[in-house]
Image: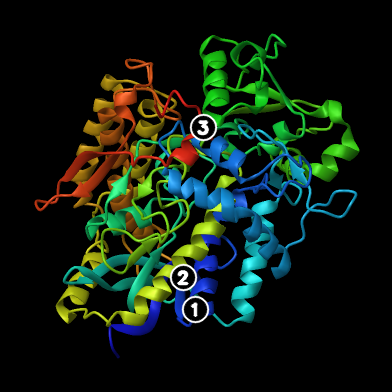
Amino acid sequence: MAEYEVVESDILIIGAGGAGMRAALAALSNGANAVIISKSVLGKAHTVMAEGGIAASVGNVDSKDNWQVHFSDTMVEGVYLSNWRMAELLAKEAPERVFELERFGAIFDRTKEGKIMQRAFGGHTYRRLCHVGDKTGLEIIRTLEDQIIHKNVKVMDEIYITKLFKDGDSFSGALGLSMREGKFYLFKAKALIISTGGCGRVFKITSNSWESTGDGLGLAYKIGVELQDMEMIQFHPTGMVYPPGVAGLLVTEGVRGEGGILTNTKGERFMLRYSPEKKELDARDVVARSIYYEIQAGRGTEHGGVYLDISQKGADFIKKKLPGMYSQFKEFAGVDITKEKMEVGPTVHYQMGGIKVEAETGATNIKGVFSAGEVASGLHGANRLGGNSLADILVFGKRTGEAASKYVKNAKPGKVKDADVASAINEVKAFIKSGGKNPNVLIEQLREKMSSNVGIMRNEKDLQDALETIESIKSQFKDVGVSGQFVYNKGLLACLELGNMLIATEAIVRSAIMRKESRGAHTRSDYPKKSKEWLKNIICSISADGSMSLSTVPLKEMPVELKKLVKPEVYQ
């Protein structure tokens, strides 16, 4: 029996979330066949955690809304670090992607006139979030999954990709380990789409589920793909803080969008002090920092949070508009949010940085490698506008699938050397040993240090200390190992994940050290102001000796017609 099984396709898609599934549908529509690989099971993508809605200027509730305003809001929220072309494409194409979802069978909440309902969200000029209660991401996954299944797109789940291969300077294949079967697969394809989501699990307090360990970032980086703006990690203002077992679990922005109010232990509505105009619906970085300041000032709750209260809206309203939040607090915290306040605090939620891609196509600097969704960078700049993540996966999932389909029509299959496959398999096998260092102990050390030193407020001393910890864990990585076999070996999975987590964290910390300013989600107490000199992207790439190299790239000049839509003093 061969040590591995070969699976061939035109396009290999790693990641079965919204971006990956939408890319597969686009590939199919353009005559290419794709295989989707999922680390988890189909339908368990982190997309389901995007609860509040999808941003699209359809103008059903506020008729003055249009793509130009959505574009402006995106650029302002990203503190002008966003790729303006990606922001333009998103704002223009999001409405059609929403209507397409509806044609696919998505069931949105409705206005009295029968149109798709839209709610307010922080940083949006108008009520723009098309939603399905507080379970919008789940409905999107359900809808796309239905399309994938009925169109017979090949999906292979519970497979962890351990290695990517190149033939010369082009992608040629990937090695994967089936956790269910305990066997290896060699995936040969002309093109690769990386849609693996973010790396939130490198922090201790996060809204991200177990899958989000930066796998796509590590895999791509190791074959020479450039990463961009990795220091930009979004802290969502509201995650659960109690009980400890659910600390960090997301409390959707929809609560504030529907009228929820933040107060401290003195009963003060403190956002009136930090943001008297936008209050609870200011940008996420503003609200998260405000909560942080209140807690640091000693006005936080006994569990280290603040209060979020929507009980004034009444039980019927809350159960209809926010059924998930009602159940979540009732089941996990024993709190009835129709009568009681919620305890909330900032939680790591999203990475704005990631794989550097071309705006129109999602192409990277490596031939045949594309990327879409949270793992790809550019759109969100220094801070993501709420609801833009779901628009992102649909707009750029479709575009990336189309671009990859076009690429494979003229591309020849690359070769994967037997020796390279054997070497990659041996790398995995080497983790199965007795007396190895426990990977989970090192992972917890890493997560603790990232949360304590690379959080909402950063400084040179803490960042350098975090880098020392990362380097120390890197030096121990060669000694990690676990006992057992390949089938559902969570220890082995931790070994594999740790390697990618170390790449992600090193990129985050080195980039945070390099960016000597405060911009969006990146706040430094030793450089508290933003600087026009830092209107540039930070690029991470692997050097010939295997070390991480950092450089900067100036932002591309924005066209005059788009400059008119944003604050003129920034783009003089």
- Residue 402: mark: 2
Q: Which residue is mark 3?
A: 566
Q: Could one spot residue 452 in this view of the protein?
A: yes
Q: Earlier in the sequence, mark 2 or mark 3?
A: 2
Q: At label 1, which amino acid type do we have?
A: Asn
- Which quadrant of the figure contains the C terminus? top left
Q: Residues within 10 Å of mark 3 (few under 14, many from 20)?
A: some
Q: How far across and how far down the image is residue 391, in percent?
A: 58, 52
Q: Residues within 10 Å of mark 2 (few under 14, many from 20)?
A: many
Q: Nearer the viewer, mark 2 or mark 3?
A: 3
Q: Residue furthest bottom?
A: 1
**Numbered disc 1: secondary structure:** loop
What's the residue at 36%, 54% (across, down)? 357
Determine whether, in the image, residue 268 is placed left or right of residue 365.
Answer: right
Chosen colour scheme: rainbow
Residue 130 % position (x, y) = 71, 49
Asked if the residue under mark 1 is in contact with the one under mark 2, i.e. CB atoms within 8 Å, the reply is yes
